[in-house]
Each structure stands twice: as structure tokens, then as C-alpha cells.
Image (spheres, rainbow, N blue to C red):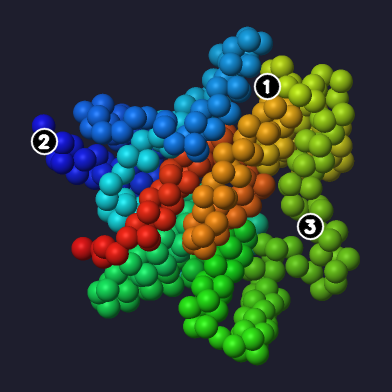
Amino acid sequence: MNPKKIEYFFDIAVALLLFSLPFSMAIPNIILAVILIFSFFKNKKKLGTNTYSNLLVLFSSYLILKAFLVNSFINNFDIYKHLFTILIVSILLFQVKNIFLVIKGFVFGVFLAVLISSIKIFIFYLAYNQLPFGNTSEVDNLILIERPYFGFICFLTIVLLHFLIKKTQESTHKYIYRFLILCAGLFLFMIVARLALFLSFSFIAIQLFLELKFSKIKLFMGFLFLTTILLSVLFLNQNIKNRFHIKDSFEGTVKVLKNQEPRFVIWECSRNQLEDTSFHFFTGYKNRADIQLNLNECYQSSIINSSKRKYYLETKFNTHNQFLDIFLSGGFIGIVLFILPLLWVFYSFRNNFSAFFMLIGLVGFLLVENVFFRQLGAYLFGIFIPLFYGVIRAHNKEDEIR
């Protein structure tokens, strides 16, 4: 087959994979297999020859080799298989030629997911005359992806749409992309995805200030205005107040926050494991399954409320912090090997605000979620650092989107 056709179909397959992410995990896996086949025929570029990929291989190899040495790989295969997904996807994404096609695939996939979820929410509102996004069980039934992940991909969509706006000269396209940014922003506001809402608001505000080139006085007034709007939204919208656990007093807010926000309990139980005699500072726990067992024991002994304790034990909350999880499972060696590729990416993205801000958002997400525990998380981590390398390359060219 013609090499150019192979590259063309390769990029289409990657775009379809990104398009399908909000809807299914089976479909991306099938498409990934197709992409692998195309990559063998491309034969244009050596796999894993860039610094980021090499550092990522080093980190993953350490965790997998350690698991084999202590005979825990099979027992924890559901987690370690996600490392293979991250490696494969990361390496393959560096081979993308038409970055604009791939970005559009992701953007329109997310927009379709937002549209479907919005219709379901609208139907629910007509039936019950309320939006259930404070803290209720209906949330997962109304949106296609769990709220933190849906929020994060909406944030990524906003950043990528801004890139598309900058690269196109077609005014019609610019209006469409701005409309999609508005839709993503309103959806984040509606479902109250806290981290994504904050990241998206900050990104849009900073970009406006940078592009409009305000004077210092106007910058200050603009910041004051946007802060006033944000605080008004937080304190006047009951749905958002419930989601952020905001009460009439600071003391009341802190009390409710500690009671209702799972991470207060989860992180304390995770931190306590660092003092356990089974934890080795340099290499972590021998069997990462011990981490979850210790968490469950901590929930059992530390949570007084019986219904809350039952909920934590049935849900089996993980550490909800990727850095802490890696430190527990891989020790000092593991966390250093994990941070090294991230530091390299920060250095590589230092001259591109959108890519740099995306990475800040990713690190923020890693601080509150264990993305390696979920297939969607593995795909997101594997895709978006290589994708933004492509964004930077495209940003430095003069070509326009066709």
C-alpha cells in the first residue's frame, strides 16, 4: 500500500479512537489494534526514540519488573495492563502527521457526548424540576462518563478549541469553535465538575488578558470583575453551593467538607500507610494489593458512621492521588521515575502557554484521581502529552487548517 495512504488511514484511525473515548472502552481497544497494524506498515519512524517515551518506558519497566520479582504481577494485572496501554498509545501518538484531524476527532466526540448528556439532563429536569448535581446518585445515570473524567475532557476540549481558533483563518470555523467552547463551559457549570470548572475558567480568563493586551489597571479591574462573578456564582447557585459544600459560615463549611468529601478520609488513610512497617521507603509495598487492603481496614476502624463506613467499604476507594499511589506501590524510586517524564514535558512545553497549562491541569487531575486505575484514565494520560507535542509542532508552522 502507498505509504501516504497508510499515514492517512493511520491518522483517521487515531481520530476515530479519540472520537470514541467518551462512549465506550471496547471500541477504542478495537481501534487501537487497527492503529498498531497500520504502524507496522508505516515503518517511518523508530518507536520510543524521543526522551519522553524513553523516560516513560523506564518508569513502567520498573513497576512491571518489580511486580514480576515479587510475584504480584498476575494478581494486579488489571492495573498493570493500563501501563501497557499508556506506553503503546503514547508511542503511537507521536507518529500522527495530521494533528488537526486528530484534534477534531476528539473535540466532536466530546461535543456529541455533551449533547447526549445534556438531553438526558433536560429530560430529567422536565420530570423533576431540579438538577441533581449537588451530591446525588442520579449523576452517573445522566452523564456518559464519571463526572471528574467528563469534566477533565471538557477542559482539554476547551484548550484544543482555542488552538484551532488560533490556527484557522476561516471566520465561520472560528464562530463554530467559540460556540463549542461556550457549550463545554456551560456543561461544566451545569454538572459542577469542580477542578475542570476552575481550570477552564482560569485558562479562558488568562487567554483573554493575554490576547486583549490590557493595561495593568484594566488587568486588575478585569480580574476583580471575574472574581466577583465567580464568587457570585458560588454563593448564589444552590447546586454549586452543595457541590462545593458551601454553608453560611466558614466553620460550617469546613465541618461539612470534612464529613462529605471522601478525600479527607481517603488521603489520611493513605498517608498512614507510609508509617506501616511493611512499607519500604525506596521500593514501596511488595504487593500493591496490600495498599487497598490497608485502606479498607482504615475505613473500617476510623469511620464512625455505620452507613458511611459501609459505603466506603463497598466502594473500595483507592488513594485518589496518583503520586501517592505510585509512592506507596513503587517507593522513592517509583515516584522519581514517574516525576522525571513530567518534568521533561514541563521543560518541553515551557514556551507554549496552552500546552503548559494543559500539563498543569493534568498534574492537578493526578493529584485528585488515580488515572492508572481506569482504562479511560490510561488513554487520557497516554494520548494528551504526545498530542500536545504535536500541537506545539503545528503551532510553530504557518500552515492553516484546511
Q: In the rendered view, tell whether residue 247 sits above or below residue 306.
A: below
Question: Would residue 382 appear left or right of 318 to someone viewing this image?
Answer: left
Spatial distance from mark 1 to mark 3, Cα to Cα? 29 Å
Going from the N terminus, do you reach mark 1 or mark 3 first?
Answer: 3
Q: Do the CB atoms of the residues marked 1 and 2 lie less than 8 Å apart?
A: no
> Is 67 or 385 nearer to us in this picture?
385
Q: Read off the residue under disc 2.
A: 2
- The answer to whether the residues at label 3 and label 2 have Cβ atoms under 8 Å apart is no
> Which mark, by number, is residue 257?
3
Residue at 21% in and 63% down: 402
Q: Is residue 21 above or below residue 192?
A: above
Is residue 375 visible to the viewer in this orientation of the structure?
no
Q: Which numbered mark, 3 or 2, is in the foreground of this view?
A: 2
Q: Which of marks 1 and 2 is nearer the N terminus?
A: 2
The image shows residue 26 at horizontal and vertical percentages of: 37, 34
Q: Is mark 2 on a helix, strand or loop?
A: loop
Asked if residue 277 can be seen in this view, the reply is yes
Nearer to us in this view, 237 or 381? 381
Q: Residue at x 63, y 16 (%)?
A: 66
Q: Distance between the residues labelled 1 and 2?
A: 48 Å
Q: In the rendered view, would you say 102 is above or below 226? A: above
Residue matched to label 1: 289
Question: Of circles 1 and 2, which is in front?
Answer: 2
The percent coordinates of residue 365 (x first, y second) are: 61, 50
